[in-house]
Amino acid sequence: MIGGAGLLMGLGLGPSAVEAAKKPDRLPPQVGDRLKITRGAHKDKFLRPEMLKVNQAPFEGFPYGVEDDVLRKRNRFNRLLFVKVEPDAIDAEIAPRAADGVLVYSAICTHTGCTIKSWVADDQHFRCHCHLSEFAVLTGGSVRGGPARAPLPMLGVAIDDEGYVVVAEAFNRKPGFKG
Protein backbone atom coordinates (compact mmCIF):
# COMPACT_ATOMS: atom_id res chain seq x y z
CA MET A 1 0.00 0.00 0.00
CA ILE A 2 1.37 3.41 -0.96
CA GLY A 3 1.06 6.27 1.55
CA GLY A 4 0.02 9.79 0.56
CA ALA A 5 3.59 11.06 0.25
CA GLY A 6 4.59 8.01 -1.81
CA LEU A 7 1.61 8.48 -4.11
CA LEU A 8 2.51 12.13 -4.66
CA MET A 9 6.12 11.22 -5.45
CA GLY A 10 4.87 8.50 -7.81
CA LEU A 11 2.83 11.13 -9.61
CA GLY A 12 5.96 13.21 -10.05
CA LEU A 13 4.78 16.06 -7.88
CA GLY A 14 8.17 16.46 -6.16
CA PRO A 15 9.35 17.23 -2.64
CA SER A 16 7.23 20.35 -2.03
CA ALA A 17 4.05 18.37 -2.68
CA VAL A 18 5.36 15.64 -0.38
CA GLU A 19 5.97 18.22 2.40
CA ALA A 20 2.44 19.55 1.94
CA ALA A 21 1.02 16.05 2.32
CA LYS A 22 2.63 15.61 5.74
CA LYS A 23 0.71 16.42 8.86
CA PRO A 24 1.76 19.85 10.21
CA ASP A 25 3.04 18.37 13.50
CA ARG A 26 5.45 16.15 11.53
CA LEU A 27 6.88 18.81 9.21
CA PRO A 28 10.49 19.88 9.71
CA PRO A 29 11.03 23.41 11.06
CA GLN A 30 9.51 25.97 8.71
CA VAL A 31 10.70 29.53 8.12
CA GLY A 32 8.73 31.74 10.53
CA ASP A 33 8.15 29.01 13.13
CA ARG A 34 8.62 30.17 16.71
CA LEU A 35 10.63 28.03 19.11
CA LYS A 36 8.72 26.63 22.06
CA ILE A 37 10.53 25.61 25.24
CA THR A 38 9.38 22.21 26.50
CA ARG A 39 11.28 21.85 29.80
CA GLY A 40 12.41 23.90 32.77
CA ALA A 41 11.39 27.25 34.22
CA HIS A 42 10.20 28.64 30.87
CA LYS A 43 8.27 25.52 29.85
CA ASP A 44 5.53 26.18 27.28
CA LYS A 45 6.80 29.69 26.47
CA PHE A 46 8.15 30.90 23.17
CA LEU A 47 11.87 31.60 23.20
CA ARG A 48 13.13 35.17 23.52
CA PRO A 49 16.86 35.96 23.63
CA GLU A 50 16.62 37.47 27.12
CA MET A 51 15.38 34.15 28.54
CA LEU A 52 18.81 32.63 27.95
CA LYS A 53 21.94 33.62 29.84
CA VAL A 54 25.33 33.44 28.13
CA ASN A 55 26.91 30.01 28.59
CA GLN A 56 24.10 28.52 30.68
CA ALA A 57 22.82 25.01 30.03
CA PRO A 58 20.68 24.96 26.88
CA PHE A 59 16.92 24.90 26.82
CA GLU A 60 15.17 22.13 24.94
CA GLY A 61 12.20 22.60 22.66
CA PHE A 62 10.52 22.20 19.30
CA PRO A 63 9.49 24.47 16.44
CA TYR A 64 5.95 25.81 16.68
CA GLY A 65 4.04 26.58 13.51
CA VAL A 66 2.31 29.88 14.17
CA GLU A 67 0.35 29.72 10.92
CA ASP A 68 -0.94 26.18 11.56
CA ASP A 69 -1.04 26.53 15.38
CA VAL A 70 0.88 23.30 15.96
CA LEU A 71 3.90 22.14 17.91
CA ARG A 72 6.03 20.13 15.47
CA LYS A 73 7.02 17.47 18.00
CA ARG A 74 5.72 14.37 16.24
CA ASN A 75 8.94 14.42 14.21
CA ARG A 76 11.75 13.27 16.52
CA PHE A 77 14.33 15.07 14.40
CA ASN A 78 12.70 18.40 15.32
CA ARG A 79 13.97 18.18 18.93
CA LEU A 80 16.13 21.28 19.41
CA LEU A 81 18.68 22.77 21.80
CA PHE A 82 18.72 26.56 22.36
CA VAL A 83 21.90 28.11 23.75
CA LYS A 84 23.24 31.66 24.07
CA VAL A 85 26.88 32.64 23.67
CA GLU A 86 28.80 35.89 23.29
CA PRO A 87 28.06 37.00 19.71
CA ASP A 88 31.72 37.98 19.14
CA ALA A 89 32.84 34.43 20.01
CA ILE A 90 30.84 32.77 17.22
CA ASP A 91 32.78 31.57 14.18
CA ALA A 92 32.29 34.05 11.32
CA GLU A 93 31.02 31.29 9.01
CA ILE A 94 28.03 30.48 11.24
CA ALA A 95 27.38 33.97 12.67
CA PRO A 96 24.67 34.68 10.05
CA ARG A 97 22.68 31.70 11.43
CA ALA A 98 22.63 33.21 14.96
CA ALA A 99 20.43 35.95 16.44
CA ASP A 100 21.61 38.05 19.38
CA GLY A 101 24.00 35.25 20.41
CA VAL A 102 21.29 32.58 20.26
CA LEU A 103 22.24 29.37 18.44
CA VAL A 104 19.82 26.53 17.71
CA TYR A 105 20.98 22.97 17.07
CA SER A 106 19.42 19.59 16.54
CA ALA A 107 19.32 17.63 19.81
CA ILE A 108 19.84 14.34 17.95
CA CYS A 109 23.40 13.02 18.06
CA THR A 110 24.85 12.29 14.64
CA HIS A 111 26.53 9.10 15.89
CA THR A 112 23.63 6.77 16.79
CA GLY A 113 20.68 9.13 17.24
CA CYS A 114 20.63 9.52 21.03
CA THR A 115 19.13 12.71 22.43
CA ILE A 116 21.86 15.11 23.56
CA LYS A 117 21.24 16.31 27.10
CA SER A 118 24.59 17.46 28.50
CA TRP A 119 26.33 20.82 28.32
CA VAL A 120 30.04 21.35 29.05
CA ALA A 121 30.06 25.05 29.95
CA ASP A 122 33.84 25.46 30.18
CA ASP A 123 34.29 24.25 26.61
CA GLN A 124 30.91 25.42 25.24
CA HIS A 125 30.21 21.92 23.93
CA PHE A 126 27.18 19.68 23.87
CA ARG A 127 27.92 16.12 25.02
CA CYS A 128 25.95 13.03 24.13
CA HIS A 129 25.59 10.74 27.14
CA CYS A 130 25.42 7.56 25.05
CA HIS A 131 28.95 7.44 23.62
CA LEU A 132 30.37 10.79 24.82
CA SER A 133 30.57 12.55 21.48
CA GLU A 134 31.11 16.29 21.92
CA PHE A 135 30.02 19.08 19.58
CA ALA A 136 31.35 22.66 19.66
CA VAL A 137 28.58 25.25 19.48
CA LEU A 138 30.84 28.16 18.46
CA THR A 139 31.99 26.42 15.29
CA GLY A 140 28.71 25.13 13.88
CA GLY A 141 28.36 21.97 15.94
CA SER A 142 31.70 20.56 14.80
CA VAL A 143 32.75 17.26 16.35
CA ARG A 144 35.29 17.76 19.16
CA GLY A 145 35.49 14.24 20.53
CA GLY A 146 33.91 10.81 20.65
CA PRO A 147 32.84 8.51 17.87
CA ALA A 148 30.53 10.93 16.00
CA ARG A 149 31.89 11.94 12.61
CA ALA A 150 29.30 14.46 11.41
CA PRO A 151 28.61 17.89 12.96
CA LEU A 152 25.26 18.69 14.56
CA PRO A 153 22.74 20.27 12.21
CA MET A 154 22.01 23.91 12.94
CA LEU A 155 18.97 26.07 12.22
CA GLY A 156 19.29 29.65 11.07
CA VAL A 157 17.35 31.94 13.41
CA ALA A 158 16.24 35.56 13.61
CA ILE A 159 14.27 37.79 15.98
CA ASP A 160 10.75 38.68 14.78
CA ASP A 161 8.92 42.00 15.27
CA GLU A 162 7.51 40.79 18.60
CA GLY A 163 10.93 39.82 20.00
CA TYR A 164 10.64 36.04 19.58
CA VAL A 165 13.35 33.80 18.15
CA VAL A 166 12.04 32.32 14.90
CA VAL A 167 13.34 29.96 12.23
CA ALA A 168 14.97 31.98 9.44
CA GLU A 169 16.65 29.11 7.54
CA ALA A 170 16.24 25.34 7.39
CA PHE A 171 18.78 23.02 8.98
CA ASN A 172 22.20 23.38 7.31
CA ARG A 173 22.38 19.57 7.05
CA LYS A 174 19.90 16.75 7.52
CA PRO A 175 19.28 15.91 11.21
CA GLY A 176 19.68 12.37 12.45
CA PHE A 177 22.39 9.85 12.97
CA LYS A 178 25.03 9.10 10.39
CA GLY A 179 26.62 6.12 12.13
Image: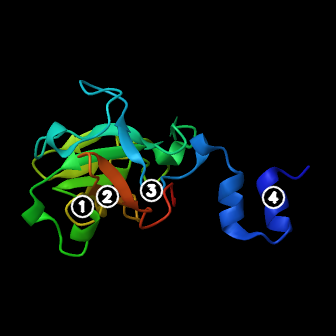
Residue at mark 1: 98
Please tell me which residue is depicted at 32% across the width and 31% down the height of the picture. 45
**Disc 4 target residue:** 6
Residue bearing the label numbered 2 = 157
Q: Is residue 165 above or below residue 6?
A: above
> What separation in Å lies between label 3 and label 2 (alpha carbons)?
21 Å
How many neighbours does mark 1 have within 10 angstroms: few (below 14), some (14-19), or many (20 or more)? Answer: many
For the residues marked 4 and 3, what is the alpha-carbon distance in whole angstroms? 26 Å
Badge 2, how many Cα within 10 Å: few under 14, some, many 20+?
A: many
Q: Earlier in the sequence, mark 1 or mark 2?
A: 1
Q: Secondary structure at mark 1?
A: loop
> Is 112 on the left-hand or right-hand side of 167?
right
Q: N-terminal of the two: label 2 or label 4?
A: 4
Residue 158, percent from left and from top? 28, 58
Packing grade of label 3 (10 A; few <14, some 14-19, many >=20) is many
Q: Label 1 vs label 2: CA separation?
A: 6 Å
Amino acid under label 1? Ala
In this rendering, which labeled residue sits more in front, label 3 or label 1? 1
